[in-house]
C-alpha cells in the first residue's frame, strides 16, 4: 500500500488526513474512516493493516492531530461539513463511512446531512445515543464516559517514552501494546514547555460532547437513517470493565427501531481494542468490504 498525507481546505484552515491505497487500485468503494473523540487518524492503522486491498481516507478531526490548529466551535454537524470538504478536495463522491466511538456519531450525522455521499455506515462501538441521567452536564458526561481519556489532555509528559508508559499502564491494554499502537500514541504528541502533550484540544472535545447531548442533533439523524448501517459492539468498556459502553437493552431498542441497522457482537474486546487488536481489526476490515445494497436501492 501507499500512504499519503493530505491537507484539505475547510473553514478557517486546513484539515489533515491520511490516505492508504493499494498500488493497483481497489475493487471496493473508498472508505472514509472517522476516529474517536480524543484520537487521531492513526487509530485506524491496525484496521488498514488488515485491509491492504482497500482505499481508506481518514482525517484528523478539527482540534486533533495535525488539525489541532483549526478553530472551533465544532460539533457533529461541523465535522460533517469538514468531511464533505475533504471528499470534495479529493474528488470523491459516494463512500463507505466508518466511525469509531464519537466518530460513529459524526458518521451518522454526516449521512443525514449528506445522504448523497454515503453508501453505507460501519459503526464501531459508537453511533447510538448514550443513556445519561437527567441533569447531567457536559463535564459530567465527559467524566462518566471518557474518564482518563480527557484527564490526559491536561497532562505534560517528560518524554515520548513516558507517554507510551502511560498507555501501557492503561487497563484497556492488559495484553500489551504493539508497534502500530505505539506509533499511534507517538503521533498524538506535540512538544510543549516541559515535554510533550496530546495534540487533542479539550475545548473542542467539550464542543463535541455538547453536540452529542443536543436532542436536535444525533437522535433525529439516527431516526431518519436512510442507508444500511452495521454496528460492531464491544462487550467491555473504555477501562476494560465488564459493562459495555452500550448496554444490551439500548442496542436492542435501536435494533428494533431501525430496519436498516444490523448489530454484530464482537467477542472478547473492549472499546479500544476493537480497532487495535489484529483479530477484531480484521473483523472491522471485513465489514468495510462487505457488499450491501447501494443506498439508492433502499426504499
Image (tube, grey):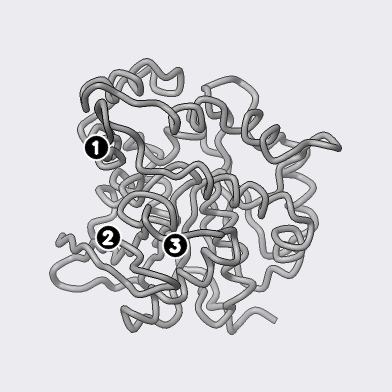
Considering depth in this image, is 97 or 165 the residue closer to the camera? 165
Q: Which mark is residue 191?
A: 1
Of badges 3 and 1, the one in the foreground is 1
**In the picture, residue 152 is in which quadrant?**
top left
Q: Indicate which disc, 3 or 1, sits on the residue closer to the N terminus.
A: 1
Q: Which residue is mark 3?
A: 290
Q: CA distance from mark 3 to mark 2?
A: 23 Å
Q: Indicate which disc, 3 or 2, sits on the residue closer to the N terminus.
A: 2
- Residue 189: x and y, percent? 28, 38
Q: Which residue is mark 2?
A: 18
The vertical placement of 108 against 294, above or below, is above
- Residue 208: x and y, percent? 59, 51
Cβ atoms at labels 3 and 2 below 8 Å apart = no
Q: CA distance from mark 1 to mark 2?
A: 21 Å
- Residue 252: x and y, percent? 75, 44
Q: Indicate which disc, 1 or 2, sits on the residue closer to the N terminus.
A: 2
SS at circle 1: strand
Considering depth in this image, is 215 or 226 the residue closer to the camera? 215
SS at circle 2: strand
Q: Residue at x 59, y 78 (%)?
A: 115
Q: Residue at x 39, y 50 (%)?
A: 64
Q: Residue at x 60, y 82 (%)?
A: 297
SS at circle 3: loop
Of badges 1 and 2, the one in the foreground is 1
Left/right of residue 254 with respect to residue 75 in the rendered view: right
Amino acid at each position: 500500500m501507499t500512504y499519503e498525507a493530505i491537507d484539505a481546505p475547510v473553514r478557517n484552515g486546513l484539515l489533515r488526513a491520511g490516505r492508504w491505497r493499494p498500488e493497483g487500485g481497489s475493487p471496493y468503494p473508498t472508505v472514509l474512516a472517522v476516529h474517536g473523540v480524543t484520537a487521531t487518524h492513526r487509530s485506524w492503522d491496525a484496521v488498514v493493516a488488515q485491509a491492504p486491498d482497500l482505499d481508506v481516507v481518514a482525517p484528523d478531526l478539527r482540534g486533533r492531530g495535525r488539525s489541532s490548529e483549526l478553530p472551533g466551535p465544532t460539533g457533529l454537524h461541523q465535522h460533517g461539513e469538514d468531511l464533505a470538504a475533504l471528499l470534495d478536495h479529493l474528488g470523491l463522491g459516494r463512500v463507505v463511512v466508518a466511525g469509531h466511538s464519537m466518530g460513529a456519531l459524526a458518521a451518522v450525522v454526516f449521512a443525514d446531512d449528506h445522504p448523497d455521499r454515503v453508501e453505507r455506515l460501519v459503526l464501531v462501538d459508537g453511533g447510538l445515543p448514550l443513556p445519561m441521567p437527567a441533569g447531567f452536564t457536559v463535564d459530567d458526561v465527559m467524566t462518566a464516559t471518557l474518564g482518563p481519556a480527557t484527564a490526559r489532555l491536561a497532562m505534560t509528559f517528560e518524554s515520548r517514552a513516558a507517554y507510551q508508559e502511560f498507555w501501557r499502564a492503561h487497563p484497556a491494554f492488559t495484553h500489551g501494546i504493539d508497534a502500530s499502537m505505539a506509533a499511534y500514541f507517538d503521533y498524538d504528541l506535540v512538544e510543549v514547555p516541559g515535554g510533550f502533550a496530546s495534540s487533542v484540544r479539550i475545548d473542542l472535545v467539550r464542543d463535541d460532547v455538547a453536540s452529542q447531548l443536543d436532542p436536535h442533533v444525533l437522535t433525529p439523524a439516527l431516526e431518519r437513517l436512510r442507508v444500511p448501517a452495521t454496528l460492531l459492539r464491544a462487550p467491555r468498556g473504555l477501562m476494560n470493565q465488564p459493562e459495555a459502553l452500550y448496554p444490551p437493552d439500548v442496542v436492542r431498542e435501536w435494533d428494533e427501531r431501525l430496519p436498516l441497522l444490523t448489530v454484530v457482537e464482537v467477542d472478547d474486546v473492549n472499546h479500544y481494542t476493537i480497532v487495535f487488536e489484529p483479530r477484531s481489526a480484521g473483523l472491522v476490515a471485513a465489514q468495510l468490504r462487505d457488499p450491501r445494497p447501494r443506498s439508492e436501492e433502499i426504499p
